[in-house]
Image: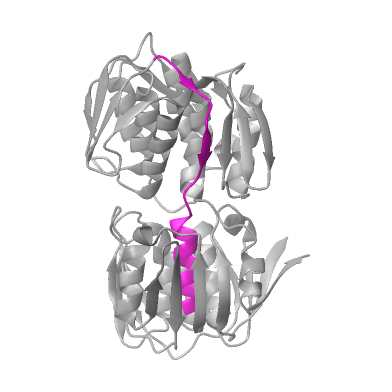
Amino acid sequence: MERLVINGGNPLFGDVNINGAKNAAVAILPATILASKGVCHIDNVPNIEDINCLETILKYLGCKVEAGNNCISIDSSNIVTTNATIPEVRKMRASYYLQGALLSRFKKARVELPGGCPIGDRPIDQHIKGFEALGATVTIEHGAVSIEAEKLVGTTIYFDVVSVGATINIMLAATLAEGVTVLENVAKEPHVVDVANFLNTMGAKIKGAGTDVIKITGVEELCGCNYSVIPDQIEAGTFMVATAACGGEVNVTNVIPKHLESISAKLIEMGVEIVEHDDSVTVKSDKNLKGVNIKTLPYPGFPTDVQQPMSTLLTLAKGRSIVNESIYENRFKHVDELKRMGANVKIEGKIAIIDGVERLSGAHVKATDLRAGAALVIAGLAAKGTTEVEGVEHIDRGYLDIEKKFKALGADIKRVND
């Protein structure tokens, strides 16, 4: 069993380079299935566990996959099966993008129900609604989603709730459909735009990504292309929050500052200095923090994936802070672990009431999901004494070499394998 051992209290100084966006890459890789000829060469792909799972799945389907140096080349011209039913599919949430991609190209798909972090109810009803609106028949049995269609025909689809997953999945399905598909009340996250840009680079006709309405004009085929994934907004936010918690000055490089505005705004409100550059942000903190109120919202609101690291930071801020988690109901699982470290937090449904303490103290804690793991690492870095974080496998799903990056900034952190 692996764990991270952290001797906290060190300020952070230096530069940290941000990887490609996990949430974009895990959708772009399944999207390569749509290329019936040519090879997709994708750059700036994070070498994380979810990507490794997708590589295994794509090879199982019959794709030729070559990976190295944050680049992946995928040839999907000779796919041999539309049944994605191997264990790796159940290990990650984003495996449901295989549904839209396989359905679009082959008019059928059988995909195991997705897994991923246990952060609350995340139904796929909006995905199913979209597939059926395009003309497909969807059945769920024996733990898998089966989808078939004689043909897919464009239509207007209004999503009842804003869903990143459903927006991308139906966008994939509609890319090769007949006619025009209009998606309304869609997600506007940067990785939605990135997937649309990738599809357009392959030859799709998609307009409006990043707005409330996406218009897709179906094409007959897509081809391989060269593409680079956008920087990871969530990884960048994690290092920004960590710097605020530990004190110091860190230059977070290879980012798009526009994507970080909601995070930057709250840190500035807390008393942290943020300086934006063309493709980097500098974070300066003297740890003299004041409490703020946060409500997670779809982009451009405050991202739910940064809520857990941010709530850790708020435990060290003066005064009372209120965190309203409006996206997922089980995203405060890390709070019990923070209490073991001395945090003063009360949970009332989707609301966390946080009264800041002078300091946290090291303890043995366990990560239950990806972003909870990042939150506990930040807590350990800021705490007095030694913290041991179990559940490192969750952290590895979304952060590449997290301990090496923090160590390069001056943190006392190491990975231990019992």
Residue 231 colored in magenta in the image: yes
Instruction: Identify the residue at the far front of this view.
Output: 278
Residue 184 colored in magenta in the image: no
Q: Position of residue 232 (x, y in %)?
A: 48, 55
Please tell me which residue lies in front, 223 or 34.
223
Q: In which image quadrant can residue 89 be found?
A: top right
Q: Position of residue 230 (x, y in %)?
A: 47, 49
Q: Is residue 347 above or below residue 25?
A: below
Residue at screen point 36% across, 67% down: 263
Residue range in magenta is: 220-243
Please tell me which residue lies in front, 337 or 133.
133
Residue at screen point 42% across, 25% down: 203
Please tell me which residue lies in front, 319 or 202.
202
Q: Position of residue 411 (x, y in %)?
A: 63, 78
Q: Is residue 156 above or below residue 44?
A: above
Image quadrant where one finds the N terminus: bottom right
Image quadrant where one finds the C terminus: bottom right
Q: Position of residue 377 (x, y in %)?
A: 56, 71
Q: Is residue 413 left or right of residue 96?
A: right
Q: Is residue 127 above or below residue 50?
A: above
Q: In which image quadrant can residue 330 be found?
A: bottom left
Q: How is the image coloured?
A: one colour
